[in-house]
Image (cartoon, grey):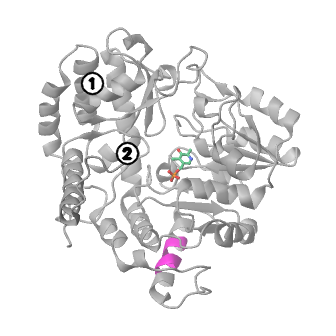
Amino acid sequence: MLAGIDVDPEGLFLRIRNLLNQHHDLFSFAIPLIASENIVSPAVREAICSDFAHRYAEGWTGERVYAGCQFVDEVELICIELMKKLFRADFADVRPISGVVANLTLYTAFARPLDTFMALSVATGGHISMAPLMGKSGVFLGGTAGAVKGFNIEYLPLDEGEMNIDVDAALKKIREVKPQLVLCGASVFLFPHPVKELVDTVNEVGGKLIYDAAHVAGLICNGYFQDPLREGVEAMSMSTHKTLPGPQHGAVVAKAEHEEVIKRAVFPGLTSNHHLHNVAGLAITLVEMLKFGKKYAGQVIKNSKALAESLYESGFDVLAEHKGFTESHTILIDVANLKDKVGLGADVEKLLEKANIILNRNMLPWDVREGRHYKNPGGIRLGTSELTRLGMKEGEMVQIAEFMERILLDGEKPEKVREEVKDFRSEFQKVHYCFESATKAYEYIKIH
Ligand SMILES: *Cc1c(COP(=O)(O)O)cnc(C)c1O
């Protein structure tokens, strides 16, 4: 579709660069609340635009099938050692290029096509990478686990009141369907999953229990949330850019006995190049976690509890009040009661975006029953990782709740609130919990 596209190369080049600049300006003065996002430090940004981005290093460190890897190897070895130390794991592979590829790595290592696989459904907080090819109603879902591995997928039951896996119902179902692979972990991940409660039964029926830490890896490696490897899982997959504030990449940690199958699943199974610049960026991120991680992760959780509490007091229907709302970076809000005033999840998302408050609509576990759809679901999801990296604390969470209250409950114009949001944000221009740098968090760095 070239309509409206200026095909003059000079003009296009300037236009693309201008769009990038505008994006940087937007994020410099926005309130970023997407639970799956974060921001890397200036040191990590430097690493991810290094020459590592141009190279290949297929194979394992020291056994590459390309020349010129001597420094790549050393960086990757440091990265692996830091992963093992922070996650207290026997084995780590930092080559999966994303969280989805990390999940596929574990599916490949531990199961065969057509095997029975259990995880949460997307509607109850699961991720599309755990989902089947076809939905129950016969619609094409295209979920990774079904589309790529052909798994027969059974859902882990959710206790909607507790916003967690229903242990008794799950144990019963595990005994019935005898899955080869069971995956804990979620994209709406408020409370630690019952790994200890499930592991023996999964093993008794001949299955393996694994854990998707895409969202919570940055909490787990700093001693918060839960410790799946100690609780009994065989391996854990993750994204490296959600609560773990690194570049967009993936990783896997596992018990020592799974080293060989995992290595082979990654290469030659699922990667050729493995984005070496991001491995370097991840190594630096892990160093930051070593030095600043405990304070960072502790503050992320304090902030999410404070934001949830403030929003609840303002009159929002924040889920799981009786459990203190959340034990992670994430908050889920039921906005169905705003339907007549402002609309549902998608409408709320759009309205807040006009005020530079950036979050996402989200399915609630009961949306399908209520006839609601992912395009305009009954919920919104918020996360506090990026705000925390910008140096915000509990006091700022109270202010953010106030901005949201004014727009969504008091009917103030978002364009007017946006000016105050910009003012509020102007004091938070640096990345925290990393080594000092003069570079601002969202500064557009010109090299050309
Ligand atoms: C985000 C997410 C993933 C996928 O991560 P990518 O790095 O985007 O590929 C996998 N699992 C869960 C639970 C997630 O939330």
Vertical position of residue 154 compared to residue 443: above or below = above
Q: Is residue 319 magenta?
A: no
Residue at 33 percent across and 17 percent down: it is 313
Quarter holding residue 262: bottom right
Q: Which residues are magenta?
A: 75-80
**Circle 1 sits on which residue?**
404
Residue at 76 percent across and 27 percent down: it is 168
Vertical position of residue 62 compared to residue 378: above or below = below
Residue at 23 percent across and 36 percent down: it is 356
10 Å crowding of disc 2: few (<14), some (14-19), many (20+): many
Q: Is residue 87 visible?
A: no
Which amino acid is tagged 1? Answer: Met
Q: Which callout, 1 or 2, points at the residue further toward the start of the chain? A: 2
Q: Quadrant of the C terminus?
A: bottom left
Vertical position of residue 72 compared to residue 287: above or below = below
Q: Is residue 41 visible?
A: yes
Answer with left or right where residue 212 lies relative to residue 1: right
10 Å crowding of disc 1: few (<14), some (14-19), many (20+): many
Which amino acid is tagged 2? Answer: Ser
Q: How many marks?
A: 2
Q: Residue 12: percent from the left, percent from the top?
A: 23, 60
Q: In this rendered view, identify the residue nearer to me: 8 or 13.
A: 8
Q: CA distance from mark 1 to mark 2?
A: 18 Å
**Circle 2 sits on which residue?**
385
Answer with left or right where residue 393 lies relative to residue 102: left
User: Circle 1 — which element?
Assistant: helix
